[in-house]
Amino acid sequence: MGRFVITSQNCYGTKGERRKMKKYELTIEKATGSCDTELFKKMAKKGDITASKIDDFVNKVVRITGWAEVHIETDDKEFNITYYATDDGYFSTGSKYFNESLEDYLGDTDTFKILKIKTKKGHTYKASPIFVNEDK
């Protein structure tokens, strides 16, 4: 896909007036599935990707329909994050371990249980594959 940079400097107030917004630059580094679409790019450009935190999906079974690795830069900070699209909306995480565990099995299944794993430094997340014929 290549890099896709989105810069936004405008936003609208509650009464529809146009106001200056802080710097918001989103670079799509890599995307697949439903995140590799013009709709996703349009949502990103407008700042309309409203993603839940991965904690909201812990112990739930989800079907991953796509994902996008992005770099976000604002006036205050700069960070990398991955958005995951599911049938129930988007969630995001910066966990490299989660992405690795997902990539290991994504070609074989699109259905996963989201697990929270305790580590020496706190916790991280893992995508545990669910067999198609397995009860959820």
Image: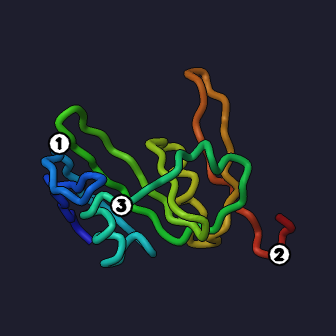
Residue 103: x %, y % from top left: 52, 60
Q: Coloured how?
A: rainbow
Q: In the depicted view, which residue is nearer to us: 27 or 128? A: 27
Q: Any mark on residue 55, and which?
A: none
Q: Is residue 43 left or right of residue 6?
A: right
Residue that numbered label 3 is attached to: 48
Closer-to-camera residue (101/45): 45
Labelled disc at residue 22: 1
At label 3, counting other C-alpha atoms closer than 10 Å, the crowd grade (few under 14, some 14-19, many 20 or more) is few
Looking at the figure, which quarter contains the C terminus? Answer: bottom right
Q: Residue at x 63, y 53 (%)?
A: 127
Q: Position of residue 17 (x, y in %)?
A: 18, 56
Question: Residue at the spot x=51%, y=60% of the render?
Answer: 90
Q: Position of residue 85 (x, y in %)?
A: 50, 65
Q: Secondary structure at mark 1?
A: strand
Residue at image mark 2: 133
Residue at 21%, 63% in the rendered image: 3
From the viewer's side, name the closer residue of 34 and 97: 34
- Label located before the other in sequence (1 or 3): 1
- Residue 1 appears at what percent x and percent y? 27, 72
Amino acid under label 2?
Asn
